Amino acid sequence: MVSRIRRVFDDHMHSRLHDDVVLRKSKVEEIISSRDVFCGDDSTFVTRTTNARGARGVEYGGFVRRFMDEYLTSDMRTYAESPSALANIRTMAFNLHAFSLQYYHGKLSVHDLADPDRAPILANKLIRFLTEEADHPKVDSTVDNILTRLRTALSWAHRKGIVRNLDLTPYYFNAARQPKITLGIADFHSVALHQFTKGEERLERARDLWVFLCLTALRYKDSQRLPNLNPDDKVFTMSTSKTGKRVTIPIFSMTADLIRKYPEGLPRLSNQKLNKYIKEVLEVVGLTQIVHIPVVRGGIETTTEARLCDVITAHTGRRQFITIARSSGIPDAIIREVSGHANLDEIDTYTHVPRETIVSEFSMLNNVLGRLSL
């Protein structure tokens, strides 16, 4: 207890802006009253105590507990004295705890996250977890918020000498959506029409659910709460879970085939399993070519390479629908009535034209332009 109070005092003395700023009595009282809170090993990044009261009210131990107790914001307040800041930190802690449990048996340490050699791998895995694999995948702005708080915590750890080396570059995330990878129409048909062998039923069910997402522009969550569908109808309507907006979705012949194939309802898979299985599906189909993915890190736009099968997710289905619809000449205003986007600008970030399509479409123009006489 004495050492914890001393750490808070030392941090206060180093970070105060004026000599007349004093350590708040409430801060010391909070430390004393929290003597029953299990803090765990300071090197472990985050641990949950047994007196959990939900995501927002849970108590945390490990390094995050120390960070919550000792860090002072720019206006010299603790997190306990700033409800909005505390809520942000708890959101970070909750998601980091889930990430640590899933991949590291709850033993992820602050030294692992700060290590310049491990940081790029951990950051990529964490971002993938937050955007695709968590029970409730996060929107870009939430991911950006979580990583911002994480960078603050790691920077503080470095200033305090808790970690010696630090590389924050991998933990930057651009909240403005970048166009993501989708399939060309030929590759899409290869996936949709692939005949699976006996023993590959799980892959077939995952493929069928993913194709349904591609044909409807639905988010994964909405695909799990569909109304009763009639394959003979031309459209169906439903309210989206994210915005509550009512959308009108066309029923294509291929969509009707899937509805008839599953009269009791579409396959029920967790988002995590669907993301895992659809990658296997594309690998089985043979879509393993290298693609270039636009990314923004530290404010610099660049590209990274990956196998096509490794970058396709459940949410790709929504982008797939918009890309195919736009390339077919469907007006953006009509697409928006199906996708439920709030404005037309958002549709641009969901559109991706494969390189092969660009080469094919401009091959005729290349012939018209001819060659230079050099």
Image (cartoon, rainbow, N blue to C red):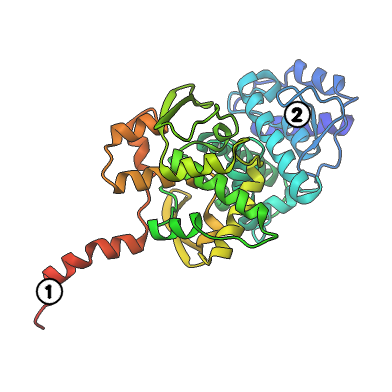
Furthest residue toward bottom:
374
- The x, y position of residue 185, in whole percent, is 38, 56
Element type where label 1 sits in the image: loop
- The x, y position of residue 281, in whole percent, is 58, 58
Which residue is more in the foreground, 118 or 177?
177
Indicate left or right for 171 with 320 as reference. Answer: right
Against 332, is 248 above or below?
A: above
Residue 75 falls in image quadrant: top right
Q: Residues within 10 Å of mark 1 (few under 14, many from 20)?
A: few
Q: Is residue 123 visible?
A: no
The residue carrying mark 1 is 370
Q: Residues within 10 Å of mark 2 (few under 14, many from 20)?
A: many
- Amino acid carrying label 2: it is Asp
The residue carrying mark 2 is 69
Which residue is more in the foreground, 356 or 286?
286
Identified at 48% across, 25% down, the residue is 238
**Marks 2/1: CA–CA distance:** 70 Å
Front label number (2 vs 1): 1
> Which of the image's four quarters has the N terminus?
top right
- Amino acid carrying label 1: it is Gly
